[in-house]
Amino acid sequence: MAQAQAQQTGNGAPGKGFRSARLGWPELDRIPHPPRRVPLLGDVLDADPRSPVQDSMRIGRQLGPIFRRKAFDREIVFVWGADLAAELADESRFAKHVGLGVANLRPLAGDGLFTAYNHEPNWQLAHDILAPGFSRAAMEGYHPLMLDVARQLTAHWDERSGAGHEVDVPGDMTKLTLETIARTGFGHDFGSFERSRPHPFVTAMVGALSYAQQRNAAPPLLAALQQRGAAKRNAADRAYLNDTVDEVVEARRSGDGTGARGDLLDRMLETAHPETGERLSPENIRRQVVTFLVAGHETTSGALSFALHYLSRNPDVLARAQAEVEQVWGETEEPAYEQVARLRYVRRVLDESLRLWPTAPAFSREALHDTTLGGVHPMRTGAWALVLIMLLHRDPAAWGQDAERFDPDRFEPKAVRARPPHVFKPFGTGARACIGRQFALHEATLVLGLLVRRYDITADPDYELSVTERLTLMPRNLRLRLTRRTPARTAQPAARD
């Protein structure tokens, strides 16, 4: 806790508003930028505002492990080199920066765990109160609810595949993960699998995330002129999300909630800080629930979708995963909590999918005091950089010359030990890393294990992976064909440890 408090106070003035790189990097001109920079407009030629992360990947490959981009009056320093990213992960020198994109979600999530500035005290208060909600004992309590939602998914997929139809992977993974976090954390049932269309909560969430992403692409004045209608829709989306959360909280307060006692919502409502006795305010509870419902399902649904895409394209990997599930789970119809962690190869499939397509594709870090990055680039206190995880995870210096290739064996224990630290960051880094990491990994490993045991998965040979960006990443229009399996109980060679 002392370290987190130091982050809050060591950052000087509250970090509000966009700070252009020119203010914090005194030798900014040493950092390369795209050619053909246009006065006043910046690096707008050949830029693709619809996919800024993938656009930055393309530019980063050309310019190297540290580069900068400017759009109008906004200039950002990007970092993806393994050595530089490792420096930025040093908690004694750098802290989380609530930067462009994430800051655009503050009208919705305020000082929730994901969007709080380091100086805001509710972050530490909420973290200390909620951390026990992700303990092993708590996770074991969530496991049966995760299984229940997975049953709904497989029933839906049995129906679709039995009728000869493909399945909508991103859409169904979104239903699965929304129901999972809503039921385990807040005792709420959205009824997602009973709907032919996405739940309005999902529609509003996608709208809010897309709006935040779009505001990255234009300066405030131009955005205000171009997006009046979009701003009005965004206000309606935020209102719907807030109203939904208020209904969930009120149901629990009135005793009408169906959630298991001791879940995340109970902790928010009933638990005081163990040292100070302080409690979360009603407004902050709303912001935390919004944060968990949005961030707790959007990224996991993307991770599962990318993993299923790669399994459909790599039959040998799918066969090894199926063999491992048969070997580890045996005749058990539904695995116990402790059996999920034994699916080591399935977990590697997830990790490798998150390496290539981390669904939260970047994070920002700011200097706690004047420092020099890489021994070359001076940074003033508060100067920040955007770590482009997408390229960090593909840096040949850390991952080899075949870093673009899908290979779960990169996560064999020996290979992991041989790599430098801080080169795999799908959940962020440091004190502000994702609090729900173990929840997400348990859920995703469980679901992927159930699916590969139940189905053979076939890709559309004409499909080419296209990725939608809405702050998070998701495969676009991914459809897969499923065939129910008759599991072979004679185990094939499973994962190598």
Image (cartoon, rainbow, N blue to C red):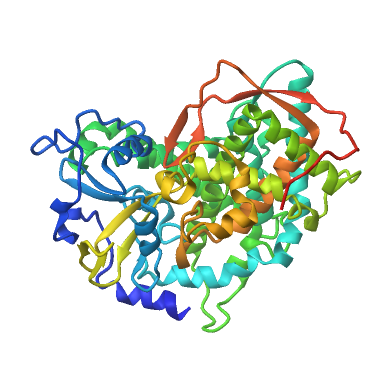
- The residue at the point 25 percent across, 56 percent down is 17
Q: Nearer the viewer, residue 167 or 480?
A: 480
- The residue at the point 48 percent across, 42 percent down is 240
Q: Is residue 143 above or below residue 275?
A: above
| Left or right of residue 369, residue 395 in this image | right
- The residue at the point 77 percent across, 16 percent down is 163
Q: Position of residue 328 (x, y in %)?
A: 83, 48
Q: Position of residue 455 (x, y in %)?
A: 77, 30
| Left or right of residue 98, residue 406 in this image | right
Which residue is the extreme one toward the bottom? Answer: 275
Exactly how many numbered labels are in the figure?
0
| Left or right of residue 488, residue 245 in this image | left
Q: Position of residue 470 (x, y in %)?
A: 42, 38
Displayed quadrant of residue 56 = top left
Q: Position of residue 313 (x, y in %)?
A: 62, 27
Which residue is the extreme one toward the left? Answer: 39
Residue 128 shows up from this direction: yes
- The residue at the point 47 percent across, 68 percent down is 431
Q: Is residue 170 above or below residue 273?
A: above
Displayed quadrant of residue 322 = top right
Residue 283 shows up from this direction: no
Q: Nearer the viewer, residue 314 or 301?
A: 314
